Image: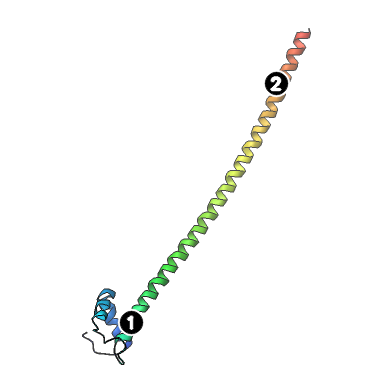
Amino acid sequence: MANTTWTKPGLWTELDALGEDMVKERLRMDFYGASGMIGSKRALVEEWLLSKEVSRREALHARQAEAASQAVEAASRAAIAAERQAAVAERANTRATIALIIAAISAAAAIASIVISLEK
């Protein structure tokens, strides 16, 4: 690594530039020191990798929460639309019932008219 500083921010900047895949490969090759070696950069590198994993998980949880929120909102809109459709259907049924009553009264009047005309 070009920078020989042992500061966490300095090392993490270098690790960011290398990327996770390269850092993991170097870690496997003990580039940052052997596992358990005191004073090695390995612990900081492992902490950096863990922080990347935590960041990915947090981002995933944030996306899932946003998706869930959007799903709830969509379900709410669908419920409102269903209620409106039910109200429209109820009004249509009421109108159809009224039309049926009028038709029945008209039929009864027609039958009465025929009966009266036959009696004459």
Is 88 positioned to the left or the right of 55 in the image?
A: right
Q: Residue 33 location in percent, x, y?
A: 26, 87
- Name the quadrant containing residue 8: bottom left
Q: CA distance from mark 2 to mark 1?
A: 89 Å
Q: Which residue is mark 2?
A: 107
The residue furthest top is 120
The residue furthest bottom is 39
The three-letter code of the residue at mark 1 reads Glu
Check disc 1: other Cα within 10 Å, few if <14, some if 14-19, many if 20+. some
Secondary structure category for the residue under label 1 = helix
The three-letter code of the residue at mark 2 reads Ala
Locate the N terminus by quadrant: bottom left
Q: Residue 57 location in percent, x, y?
A: 40, 71
Q: Is residue 70 above or below residue 90?
A: below
Is 37 positioned to the left or the right of 64 in the image?
A: left
Locate the C terminus by quadrant: top right
Which residue occupies 50% across, 62% down?
A: 69
Comparing 46 with 109, the one in front is 46
Query: Of circles 2 and 1, which is in front?
Result: 1
Which residue occupies 68% across, 32% down?
A: 98
The scheme the figure's colours follow is rainbow
Q: Residue 65 location in percent, x, y?
A: 47, 65
Q: Residue 72 location in percent, x, y?
A: 52, 58
Check disc 2: other Cα within 10 Å, few if <14, some if 14-19, many if 20+. few
Is 43 positioned to the left or the right of 84 in the image?
A: left
Q: Is residue 37 above or below residue 67?
A: below
Which residue occupies 45% across, 64% down?
A: 64
Q: Earlier in the sequence, mark 2 or mark 1?
A: 1
Q: Are marks 2 and 1 in contact (CB under 8 Å)?
A: no
Which mark is on residue 46? Answer: 1
Which residue occupies 76% across, 13% down?
A: 115
